[in-house]
Image (tube, grey):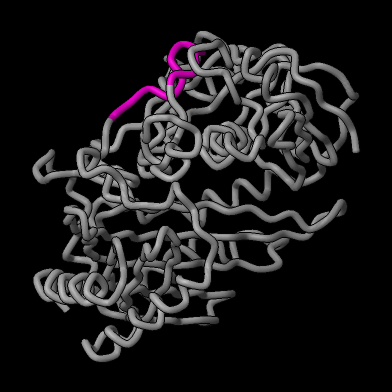
Amino acid sequence: MNTNEKYALADLVIEHALKNGAEQISVSIYDNRSTNIEIRDQKIDSLKESNQNGLSISIYVDKKYSSHSTNRLKKEDVFSFVDEAIIATRFLAMDEFRSLPDPELYYKGGGPELDLFDPKIGSLDAKTKIDLTNQVLNEAYGKDERIISVSSYYSDSISGGIMVNSNGFRGDSKNTRIGLTAVVSLKSDTGRPNAYEYENGIFFDRLKKTEIGKRALERVIGKINPAKIATGKYPVIIENRVAGNIASPIYQALMGSSLYQKQSFLIGKENKAVASPLMTVYDDPFIKSGAGSRLFDDEGIAAVKRPIIEKGILRNYFIDDYYGKKLGMKPTSGSSSNIVFDSGTRSADEMIKSMKKGVLVTGFIGGNCNGSTGDFSYGIEGFFIQDGKKVHPVYEMNIAGNMNNFWFNLAELGNDFLENESLRIPSLMFKNIDLSGI
């Protein structure tokens, strides 16, 4: 089904729903093609190809709301599906805050070219994909006698969709994504460590396809013979690819749903300091070929670049239309696009070399954060640093604290954020962080 056919079907669905008792309705029609390949120890363990399409509706009837989806897209089947949805919605409780957004908030066309689609991915044959997956695996397989297993993965997706709201919004998008991953596990006297490396992106020709398996092997070798360190306060560097783990509680605390349910440690903090002045974070939907780039969100609200935290000061929450009405706040968007941290001038390696005694965190293992209070405790793995060098791996250690205080200890941001991720966060250096043995 092409884009015009999707729009035509959506218009028919809206017309039918309004004639049969719906007050408002939002219709989304989407399709997705994907491939996933796993090769384990030079044997294809899994090869999956899928083609999916579907239609989903958000429907408003007598001040009541529900959402439904189906993959039966013949007109007669869709009309029956809508009729049943209207009947079912009438059994629900009324909610005065449920309605489509004000049309003034909608994306109305135009905007920058985001360049989010690579037609070449759709023309790749199975042999090319399998050969790539094997190439990643063979960079590590058989390269060390301690290897237990090596797995490599290929994935791609081609997706497109449209959304039409009965009060005026119309928008469509299409995206591609491709990725390669290697996972290596070893045997050692102290356990069976494993490590991974990956590359992903939007375009096949821009994807880094070499040394993924080699880097995964180097990472896992570095984990051999770990040791604990004494409990205490340390300077800590958190590697860019796992820094999102420590930042995710902030994101959750900024959501309108968390604010309304009193599950946010950032309630009432707008325009107040919540982090070190070094920390500036933007939500930027207009980065060309950005993993999270978009012209509108999943409600049709026009994308806007806005500061989230500016020199440590909280500037904006993520407020969708529904919770905006409940909280009496202006909607921004209920989801993020590209979260971009201001970066510093040094790489993680340069920061390590400047560290007299501390810890480099390369992974998080379990743990949790209390959304209401901000108290957190996570297991970590990484390396003990002394005089600017990695002395030995660390394990069975916890990092703990409170999010309301933790981010004031941010001492430096690296210059190494990952460009192909929607969370563009660099390596982070903190001072005086509590680490303890398990």
Q: Is residue 60 left or right of residue 426?
A: left
Give the residue displayed 17% in from the left and 53% down from the top.
Answer: 168
Could you tell me residue 359's position as x and y percent?
72, 25
Relative vertical location of residue 36 with respect to residue 113 in this rendering, above or below: below
Q: How many numbered discs, if any?
A: 0
Q: Is residue 422 visible?
A: no
Image quarter in which the C terminus is found:
top right
Give the residue displayed 51% in from the left and 67% down from the top.
Answer: 152
Q: Quadrant of residue 150?
A: bottom right
Give the residue displayed 35% in from the left and 70% down from the top.
Answer: 56
Relative to the observer, which residue lies in front, 37 or 257? 257
Give the residue displayed 61% in from the left and 12% down from the top.
Answer: 354
Q: Is residue 82 left or right of residue 98?
A: left
Could you tell me residue 410's position as x and y percent?
60, 15
In the image, is residue 313 part of the stretch drawn in magenta?
yes
In the image, is residue 156 part of the stretch drawn in magenta?
no
Could you tell me residue 59's position as x and y percent?
36, 65
- Residue interval drawn in magenta: 305-315
Image quarter in which the N terminus is found:
bottom left
Q: Is residue 244 left or right of residue 328?
A: right
Residue extending furthest top? 277
Q: Quadrant of residue 398?
A: top right
Relative to the observer, which residue lies in front, 2 or 414? 2
Could you tell me residue 319's position as x and y percent?
44, 37
Q: Is residue 69 visible?
A: yes
Majority secondary structure of magenta residues: strand
Relative vertical location of residue 204 with respect to residue 308 in this rendering, above or below: below
Relative to the observer, which residue lies in front, 85 or 293? 85
Relative vertical location of residue 275 with respect to residue 222 in this rendering, above or below: above
Q: Is residue 395 left or right of residue 265?
A: right
